[in-house]
Image (cartoon, grey):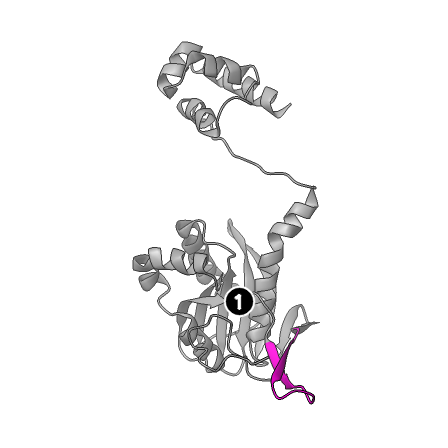
């Protein structure tokens, strides 16, 4: 049914433009038979590239949509994002008050901030953008710029958070794909988000002044090392982040200072023995 509807759209728009199938085929650099098959809803033998070539002269955008088990696909796609959110919260100290998914709509500028963190003692406001992959640099930087420009004033008005300085951090998974993507775009990131993981973690412990940076973070819980009385070595157990709601916000509770993150360049402690 989708192929039939797509073919109908191609045919209607082509005729609206006053083009024959031969005209469109020439503009798209494909065979006329390809245009004819697509308009009849027979796209199985055509590549996505050929379909886009036929649609382009008509000003039609072709989007590829994957569907799988309804809402279960959304949960699967969002699972890593949720793990990164929890990892960020678990690594913030008890002095940071956290708001998850802060939405805003200000004179047509609308959106949501993945995580907001407020340090009342230092009067520092931190806006955190979480991405599981760096797909569009322009979109990410534009979104972060809009949020940094609009959200702090809204928070000062609505929550009374009179900030002294603002931090803006892009959180990415600590994996080779993310690091390669940042390295490839380093001329841009060195200007827009110059601070990196080690300095970001230091700023979180002792926030002072503005911050713009990238934080590579493993999407796993912080680990706690305990002694095994029956063994000369040490045993590691995961420590789940404990978060509770408080007046519409979320307060990060951790038992002590955040430990080194897996893959963090700052983590120079010996490997855990098993």
Q: Is residue 226 magenta?
A: yes
The residue shown at (49%, 54%) is 133
Which of the 4 quarters of the picture holds residue 219? bottom right
Percent of width and height locating residue 105: 55, 53
Q: State the SS at label 1.
A: loop
Q: Is residue 216 above or below residue 256?
A: above
211 relative to 107 in the view: left or right: left
Quarter in which the N terminus is drawn: top right
Residue 261 visible in image? yes
Query: Is residue 38 part of the magenta span, yes or no?
Result: no
- For the record, the magenta segment spans 223-240
The residue where tag 1 is placed is 218
Q: Position of residue 178 (x, y in %)?
A: 44, 58
Residue found at the far front of this picture: 231
Q: Is residue 194 left or right of residue 33?
A: left
Q: Is residue 18 visible?
A: no
Relative placement, left or right, of 199 versus 152 is left
Residue at x 53%, y 63% (from the top left corner): 154
Q: Which quadrant: the C terminus?
A: bottom right
23 w.r.t. 272: above or below:
above
At x 47% / y 16%, what residue is drawn? 35
| Label 1 neighbour load within 10 Å: few <14, some 14-19, many 20+ | many
Q: From this viewpoint, which residue is outermost toward the left?
A: 187
Front residue of 232/220: it is: 232
Pinpoint residue 166: horizontal percent, then vertical percent: 44, 71
Tell me residue 76's x, y (percent).
64, 51
* Residue at the (61%, 67%) spot, across then down: 86
């Amino acid at each position: 049914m989708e192929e039939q509807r797509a073919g109908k759209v191609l045919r209607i728009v082509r005729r609206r433009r006053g083009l024959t199938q031969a005209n469109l085929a020439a503009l798209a650099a494909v065979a006329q038979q390809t245009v004819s098959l697509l308009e009849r809803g027979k796209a199985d033998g055509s590549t996505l590239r050929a379909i886009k070539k036929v649609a382009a002269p008509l000003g039609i955008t072709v989007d590829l949509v994957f569907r799988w088990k309804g809402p279960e696909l959304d949960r699967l796609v969002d699972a890593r994002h949720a793990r990164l959110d929890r990892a960020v919260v678990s690594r913030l100290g008890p002095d940071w008050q956290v708001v998850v998914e802060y939405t805003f709509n200000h004179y047509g500028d609308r959106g949501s901030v993945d995580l907001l963190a407020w340090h009342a003692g230092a009067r520092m406001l931190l806006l955190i953008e979480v991405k599981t992959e760096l797909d569009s640099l322009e979109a990410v930087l534009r979104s972060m710029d809009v949020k940094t420009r609009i959200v702090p004033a809204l928070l000062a008005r609505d929550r009374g958070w009179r900030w002294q300085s603002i931090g803006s951090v892009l959180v990415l998974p600590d994996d080779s794909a993310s690091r390669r993507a940042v390295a490839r775009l380093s001329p841009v990131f060195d200007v827009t988000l110059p601070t990196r993981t080690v300095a970001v973690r230091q700023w979180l412990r002792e926030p002072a002044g503005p911050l713009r940076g990238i934080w590579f973070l493993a999407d796993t819980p912080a680990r706690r090392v305990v002694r095994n009385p029956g063994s000369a070595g040490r045993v590691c157990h995961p420590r789940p982040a404990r978060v509770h709601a408080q007046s519409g916000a979320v307060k990060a509770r951790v038992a002590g200072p955040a430990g080194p993150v897996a893959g963090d360049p700052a983590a120079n402690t010996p490997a855990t023995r098993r």
